[in-house]
Image (spheres, rainbow, N blue to C red):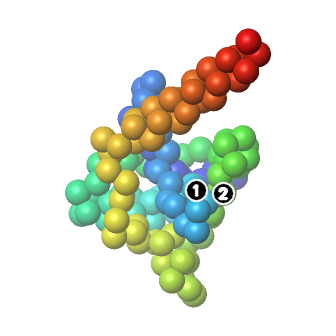
Amino acid sequence: MNIFVLLYNSGTEKEGIHSIELKGRTIVLMFEDKDDAERYCGLLEAQDFPSPSVEMINIDDIRNFCTKLDYECKLVEKNFTPKTPEDRLLISPPQKNLEVDKWNMVETNKEDLDLNSIKANLEKLL
């Protein structure tokens, strides 16, 4: 089954997938209907967030991707109606977004932590 996801910098080395943070979990949204995905993109853009592109992809590929990264994936079905405040995030982005220029900082901080851990472990060997 093919679904639609929101990608940033599609086809480049800096390609990324749109996700939301909910209760400490990273959730990748998958849309059954392309119009719903495009509407979500418009809502992101209205919040001055960079507009992603809507890309069709096999649902199993996204599920495998999410499993490898310990992310969750949620399918937003056509004519989806939210029943809880959390469900509303599946059709309308949160009011607060992670600043784009801080994405790289988050990755850099993780890399620094890993390097510091490695150094500490090597020093213990001496």
Dot 2 alpha-carbon crowd within 10 angstroms: few under 14, some 14 to 19, many 20 or more: some
Q: Is residue 7 above or below residue 111?
A: below
**Image quarter of residue 123:** top right
User: Where residue 124 sits in the image (x, y, percent)?
Assistant: 73, 21
In percent of the image, x 69 and y 48: which residue is there? 70
Residue wearing tag 2: 72
Q: Nearer the viewer, residue 57 or 100?
A: 100
Circle 2: element type: strand
Q: Residue at x 40, y 42 (%)?
A: 103
Alpha carbon of mark 2 to alpha carbon of mark 1: how far? 6 Å
Residue 101 position by quadrant: top left
Instruction: Kindly identify the amino acid type of the residue bearing the numbered disc 1.
Output: Thr
In the image, what residue occupies the spot 52% across and 61% down?
21
Q: Are the residues at dot 2 and dot 1 in contact (C-beta closer than 8 Å)?
A: yes
Secondary-structure class at tag 1: strand
Q: Is residue 58 visible?
A: no
Picture coordinates of residue 86 (x, y %)? 54, 77
Q: Nearer the viewer, residue 62 or 96?
A: 96
Residue 13 x, y percent position in the rendering: 45, 24
Which mark identifies residue 26? 1
Give x and y (percent) for residue 62: 65, 46
Q: Give the answer, above or below, for where 25 lies relative to 53.
A: below
Q: Is residue 60 left or right of residue 79?
A: right
The answer to whether residue 64 is seen in the rendering is: yes
What's under tag 2, amino acid-wise? Answer: Glu
Residue lying farthest to the bottom in this orientation:
83
Q: Is residue 50 left or right of residue 116?
A: left
